[in-house]
Image (cartoon, grey):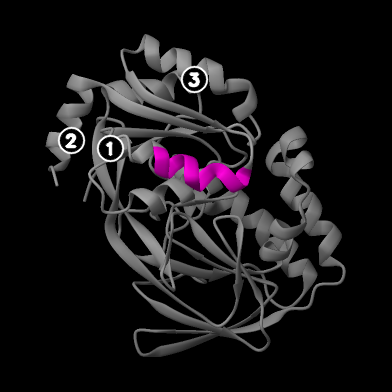
Amino acid sequence: MRTKQELSAAIRRERRAVLVVNAHSRRGRQLYEETRSRLVAAGFTLLGTYPVDRPAELEQSLAAAADLGPDLLVAGGGDGTIGTAARLLAHRDIALGLLPLGTTNNFARTVGIPLDLDAAVAVLTDGKVIDVDLGLVGNMRFTNHIGIGLSADVMLRTPPRLKRVIGRIAYPMTALALLTRHRPLRAAVRAEGRRHEFLTHQLYVANGGFHAGRPITADADADDRLLVAYPVGGPTRRGLLRDTARNAATGHRRTLVEEPFLAVRELWLETDRPAPVEVDGEPYGETPIRIGLDPNALRVMAAADSPDR
């Protein structure tokens, strides 16, 4: 496998890329042709282009694109699309280029990709290859987070059409509708020889630095060899709403050493009853689960001044 520097040089010199756009995502359908035109105008030779209208065909299209042997696989879509691409490209000699066309774009925010399309394309032309960590739940890799409890119910029940029309506001609207009948969970997290218990409606385990389009803390990212486990609120519905608002407003000012954050490399999580689990916004299964890290597993095209551990 080439070094990151060698792969960066090949991308700048050869401009050999493939494009996969989730045309089912919020902005993907409108922006596919525009994205393709801008990449060609930037000097990229597109070995293949794949507008994906059906979610069930996304993984197959990504695999077909990677099989063409590009230096850069450009994925346009939301966090679900990016997560699928990341799993496919883990430990491969292909860099992932990000075009954030989704609702919250958490992973793009984590690695510093601009949400403006022109600026994101500029990163692909002028940036460099960095490597970042992926999370592991069982044998499945993930980019952003795992949600246990209410968020998994929300992901299962938020109407896709509502997401396309009003964006990320669709999630809290659905959550409010479900919360009236939601019961809190007693969750136990075992990590580094210690046991931590939480009574909460919602628990997250994050690999990246953003959730719902907002910073988790000022110092969480996807290249720090750490997972961050944290509850949102306690057993009351009012506490969940209060902490959700507080996290959104103050995440950029908090650090991982503050409560209630638990920063570790691996953990075992169980709940008092089987609880639904979502991984990067997609249903996964139920608790109990083991969550770990795959350090520096994914190569990503990022801005030229991006930190790279």
Choose mark 3 or mark 1, whichever is in front: 3
Q: Which numbered disc covers residue 144? A: none
Q: Position of residue 309 (x, y in %)?
A: 21, 51
Q: What segment is highlighted magenta in the picture?
A: 55-64
- In 3D space, how far apart are the residues under numbered discs 3 and 1 (Cα atoms)? 23 Å
The tag earlier along the polypeptide, 3 or 1, is: 3
Q: For this rendering, which residue is in front, 97 or 253? A: 97
Q: Name the residue: 54% across, 17% down.
A: 33
Residue 270 position within the rendered picture, expressed as x and y whole percent measured from the top left: 56, 85
Q: Residues within 10 Å of mark 1 (few under 14, many from 20)?
A: some
Give the amino acid type for the residue marked by disc 3 in the picture.
Thr
Taking the magenta stretch, the answer to whether it contains residue 160 is: no
Q: Is residue 63 a member of the stretch shown in magenta? A: yes
Residue highlighted by disc 3? 35
Residue 152 is left or right of residue 238, and the answer is left
- Specify the amino acid type for callout 1: Ser
Provide the secondary structure element on which disc 2 rests: helix
- Location of mark 1 (residue): 306
Identify whether 131 is placed above or below 125.
below
Measured in 3D between alpha carbons, the distance from the residue under mark 2 to the one under mark 1, in whole angstroms, is 16 Å
Where residue 230 appears, x then y in whole percent?
53, 69
Q: For residue 7, which numbered disc appears in the image? A: 2
Q: Quadrant of residue 237?
A: bottom right
Mark toward the start of the polypeptide (3 vs 2): 2
